[in-house]
Image (spheres, rainbow, N blue to C red):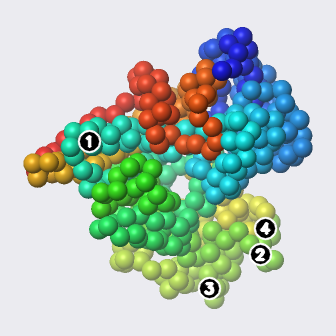
Amino acid sequence: MMSSASRKILVLGSGFVAKPCVEYLSRNPNNTITVASRSLERAKLLITGLPNTQAITLDANDEAKLTIALESYDLVISLLPYTYHPTVLRAAIATKTHMITTSYVSPAMRALDAAARTAGILVLNEVGLDPGIDHLYATRAIASIHANGGNVREYHLYCGSLPEPGVAARNPLHHGFAWSPRGSLLALMNAAQYISANKVVKVEGKNLLRGATPIDIPGWDAASKSGLEFVAYPNRDSVSFRVWYDIPEAEVILRATLRYNGFCEVIVALIDMGWMDTTPKEWLSPETTWAEATQHAIGAPNASEDSLKASIRSVCSFGSDSDADRVLSCLHWLGLFSFTKVTFRAGNLLDTLCANLEVLMKLEDGQRDLVVMVHKYVVEWQDGSTETITQTMEMYGETEGDSAMAITVGRTCGIATQLVLDGVFDHIRGIQAPYKSEIVDPIREVLDKDDSITFTERRVRT
């Protein structure tokens, strides 16, 4: 167990989820927290008013310098993009420093499990929202169902981070971004797989959003939510959760992402038009207009709006004329038919588009976000009856403060970190995620005391 006198924590990253994490850890006077970022000013701003904190600059790409830095710390939290985690982990192994991330366990991380165990460190991942809070409550519900003689025939998870409805309704994509949209847009082309009718269904990245389906959220009244409803599409790998959640009997396992209706059709059109392409384009320059860029991307005869729209109807597949009209109207709102010059970035279409979205769809101060998470279990009981159990969380961000996404990710990460520092997981080593009760239960017991994170359960028996 670590000394209760002083625990030194290095937090890599000063993004929006870092502050709730650092704030939670700063409540313990035995913790000293250092926030490291490429931007010293941003790190200093994050720790303003928080006790026992300091800010430094550090390049996480420099493994040698990172290794030297970690010599001074008991634990490192990587809130960087997941691609940085293996570099951080190699430094953590070299210095025998425990490590925390909120990301899914990647193959590159899992490949270092033996080295982490040899170093005697715990590398705890997936302690955010999704992944994170989803595991904490799904595993408890499934354990309870099994303990009471039930079989989980279907398990569904739906989760989304969205603008609050009144804000989302102000633009035709029904969406918004609190930070750079690049990562979010690229994730929309990830391949996925899930289980349906006891068979594995694989979805290519290019088709991910094409299969988005309407979904009813228990307790959601669209009439009072600016008329907005939800659609869902598969999120990464659902198949492995048959093992992780110990539900071999399940015939359906689907973990999915939520978006408001109207979003997916527009993104599919942008994909088909080539606007999600990250390869450099020689013809793209700061002097190119949006209409010219669209013309080049889709191979239109000229850059007039009529020509662009006709070519888009040919390039894209629309379900109906009304669907086409709505998407074209949205593309017009995005400025893709205009003769103003593009916001040129990185020489490619995706980054140039992102530069525009950051302005058009930025969540402004005072505009709240919304996190929605729904667990759905279809249970077969021993008497032959079937029961559908749903557990729903709706959490709005603070008007003047942290977003719901930042709170749910950052605070969960902070709780897990404090438990590691307190020695609760001293018997556990290597690459881990919160799937088993020995990790899940202590984190959830603390999180259950947080009144802002609550689930409403509904049961329908047939």
Q: Amino acid at mark 4?
A: Gly
- Camera-near label (2 vs 1) is 1
User: Is 446 on the left or on the right of 16, as rendered?
Assistant: left
Q: Nearer the viewer, residue 354 or 287?
A: 354
Q: Closer to the N terminus: mark 3 or mark 1? A: 1
Residue for point 44% across, 30% down: 441
Left or right of 258 on screen, residue 350 = right
Asked whether the residues under the numbered discs 2 and 4 touch, taking CB atoms below 8 Å apart as contact, a structural biologist would say: yes
- Mark toward the viewer: 4 or 1: 1
Q: Earlier in the sequence, mark 2 or mark 4?
A: 2
- Image quadrant containing the N terminus: top right
Label whose residue precedes the other's in the sequence (4 or 3): 3
- Identified by mark 2, the residue type is Lys
Q: CA distance from mark 3 to mark 2?
A: 16 Å
Give the Cα distance between marks 2 and 1. Answer: 55 Å
Q: Earlier in the sequence, mark 4 or mark 1?
A: 1
Query: Which quarter of the picture shows residue 350?
Result: bottom right
| Coordinates of residue 59 in the picture (x, y in percent) | 85, 42
Q: Dot 1 corresponds to which residue?
A: 145
Single out the mark in the foreground, 3 or 1: 1
> Label 1: how many residues lie within 10 Å, few (<14), some (14-19) or many (20+)?
some
Image point (38%, 49%), residue name: 246
Tag 1 secondary structure:
helix
Q: Are marks 3 and 2 in contact (CB under 8 Å)?
A: no
Q: Label 4, on which residue?
A: 347
Task: Report the amino acid beneath label 1.
Answer: Ile
Q: Which mark is residue 281?
A: 2
- Regarding mark 4 in the picture, which secondary structure is present there? loop
Residue drawn at point x = 26 percent, y = 38 percent: 147
Q: Is residue 107 above or below residue 39?
A: below
Residue 300: mark: 3
Residue 160 shows in the view:
yes
